[in-house]
Image (tube, coloured by chain):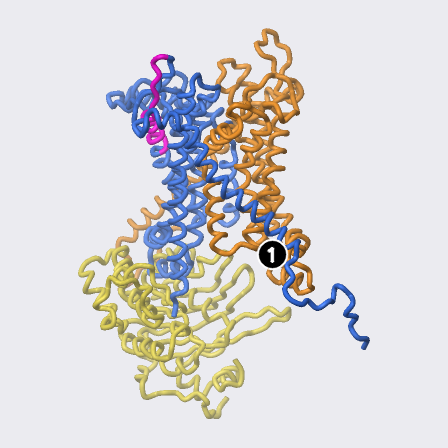
Chain colours: A yellow, B blue, C orange
Amino acid sequence: MSTTIEPTVRVETTRRQPMPPRERLETIFHVDGLDAIYSGKPAVKDVTMEVYKNLVTAIIGPSGCGKSTYIRCFNRMNDLIPGFTQTGTIRYHGQDISGSNIDPVAVRRNIGMVFQRPNPFPKSIHDNVAWGLKVLGMRDDLDERIERALTRAALWDEVKDRLKASALSLSGGQQQRLCIARAIAVEPDVVLMDEPASALDPIATQAIESLMHDLKSEYTFVIVTHNMQQAARVADMTAFFSISQGDEGQRWGELIEYDATEKIFTAPSDKRTEDYVTGRFG
Amino acid sequence: MTALDLTDATRRPFTGRRVRFGDVALQVVAGAAAAAATVLVGLIIWKVIDGARPAISHYGLHFVWRIAWNPVLGREVYGAGSFLFGTAITSLFALCLAAPLAMGIALFLSELAPRGVRAPVTALVETLAAVPSVVIGLWGILVLGPALRTNIESWLHSAFGFIPLFGDPSQAGASIFTAIIVLTIMILPIVSSISRELFLGVPPELKEGALALGTTRWEMVRGVVFPYARGGIAAALILGLGRAVGEAIAVTQVIGGGVFIHANLFGGGDTLASKIAASYQGSSTNLQTASLVYLGLILLVFSLLANISAQLIVRRVARRHGITRGGHA
Amino acid sequence: MSAQGLTGPGLRLDRLPRRRRVNRLMEGLAWLAAAIAIAILGVVVFSVAQKGASELNLNLLTKPPIQFSLTNAPQGLANAFAGTLVIVGLATAMALPVGILVAVYLNEFAPASIRNGVSMALDILNGVPAIVIGIFVFGLLVVGSGQSGLKGAFALSCLMLPLVARATMEVLALVPNSLREAGLGLGVPQWRTTLSIVLPQTVGGIVTGTVLAVARVAGETAPLLFTSSLVGTQTSWNPYHALQTVPVAIFELSESPDPADHARAWAAALVLLVFILIASLGGRWLATRSRTKMLAR
């Protein structure tokens, strides 16, 4: 497609900082020919892309295109699902983390995750953040680490007087920010977010988006979202996945296009991308 | 369209409310059955108290801790003390042995076992519960007891005999020690199967949240699964304890009998339940019979307490976790 | 499964080897616990099978025991097997209808408070030790009038009642309300709907529950000690007399010093165990099968 389309999605460029030029981007993940298969049925096929450090990368696409499955490959969470196999490679800082000789515990130590529905532990707010720190051996300056994590998750002011209260007494948006605090407290390298705001109201959503924006200088974010506007607001790079069909009716997800967000939303190269972002389908 | 024939009895419009005989009959009969079941519990309690009455009026509450049991006519004296001690020792030790084993089995079946292995192993553990106590007792006195005697009791006695616990080994394997092992085997299935269901009931998103932080499986179990299941495990342990306390047959077959309290694990003794079972041939006097029923009353009180407290815990836990689940705004 | 890999600048891998070792130790202990449980079951079943098989022959079932036998005349435990059949059969006949009715009442008619109360009573009944049930029936029925198979059956039925009632309640709850509404909507009165439409749906679950309850009480000794244990050696099918039963026979033989008695005890235990295991495993298999069927509907 050579013509620029009139976007039906307004791309907010004001809030987002401009991306550094391509040459200065550092690759953190190199995905090569990745297939994700549940009990013989492929969910995602042949994905090749690079994720860059200190950017927010969004994965968008219609439901059922395997976005969640894809992102869970990065921290080996799919290992928990019986019958799951994976071919191809994901290189993290040059090392293939999809191999069976790699300890998933070590992978997850460095690549954290926030889930679609907030899942705080049934402990106090303080202990939710403290538990991971203690188990992973980061007990020094525990209280400071907790305060720092909660501040960065934009939750500190709201909970600083009731750290001993149960985490379940918080609202949904607060719980999700607590989960973010819990994830970043252990100082991961990358934070994966699987539709983190889909269960939340717009105000809570906005808080989380600001958070990503403020923290991306220290972490790399990969976010799955079904909300195009969110991707447009928050992401530097966007990967569009769509559903392909086989002859016998099997369906799987494929990476259609991956580029700077602005380009995806204003001048996509693939017609399917264009159809999706203009709302013609999906 | 032909008009509806309103003289047809099945279509007659009903004026006023008609109470059908059949409905009332079924409700009354079924209700009577339910009432009977409830009354049965009360009847049991009452009849046991009634049967123990001669001993209660003769000895009062002192019976519970008096250490004596002499049926010889003219010098009759009865008391539950040594059997209470026997029950406490055997059941508590059995619980201490069974609890970690049961937790291990439950963790294995809920977290670690490969998919194909789970169902068969679960069935096998439950099968252990199906073996009748008299068969376990038979195996206990003819196989386990002698084996423990030759292999473990004599070794422990020679190595640690200075500790009163490891006194003279039993004659043929009938000892408190054997009874403890037998009880451990018998309560293992119930504690492990309740715990297994508790562990399986932990919401997967909690477990994923812990693992995503980069913790090992054991750390996740310790930090998320155990705390979540804590109440239910307490109930399971109480139920296991109740089961151990109430077991009469297998214990009486292997425990060797005895009235006096002593520290030697390898000596004989009796529990409340085993004493009653050992005396089924009949007792010589009314007082003895009443004393035996008094033992049963103590047993009944304990098992009621255990049962009700386990139920209360389960109810409280269910409520708390119900609230947890619905809390996502 | 090996734990390696991941090296790199800025990556956090502190204390990982030690944590991995602890994890592996704990996992090993869990495997060990499961192995111990299976081993125990294996040893018990193997002992019974091995020792029982050598003495197992038709005499066991057909010949009565001979008291003070000085010869090697064939003897068996015919009276015990007959007695068990009679007593367990009678116990089932007593517990089954009452259990079903209790379940029907609780599930179809009772307000929540009564349902909770009676449920709790059933759970308490389930938790009463069998030996206490024995004393109870002894005091209620045996004192003054003597033992009988019927009284033993009553004691067993007290143990069976909560099991049958609970199993029936579970299946009744699985019957969809739409079925009840369909019946009532046709103008069929409630009692008829319950008996002809709802209950037939539950037959599978009731059968399963009964089989499991039978498996449970067939091996029960304690309640019978006080209600049906003072017996002679003839084989009797008359429930008005005290009847010998297999568990009580095993119990008595196990206490005897005579090894020939032990051998017969093993053989009887083998027969009992086989019966109970078949009933127990079969009942469980039936349960999972009927539950999947009901949920798939």
Magenta extent? B74-91
Q: Say left or right for A161 vs A244.
A: left
Residue A26 lies left or right of residue A37; in this view the side is left
Q: Secondary structure at mark 1?
A: loop
Residue C194 in magenta stretch: no
User: Chain for mark 1?
Assistant: C
Residue A60 drawn above or below residue B257: below
The crowd level at tag 1 (other Cα within 10 Å; few <14, some 14-19, many 20+) is some
Residue nearer the viewer, C243 or C188: C188
| Relative to C11, A2 lies left or right | right
Q: Is residue C97 visible?
A: yes
Q: Main secondary structure of the magenta part?
A: helix
Q: Name the residue beneath numbered marker 1.
A: C175
Residue B154 can be seen in this image: no
Q: In x, y percent, where is residue C100?
A: 60, 46
Q: Residue at x 61, y 58 (%)?
A: C296
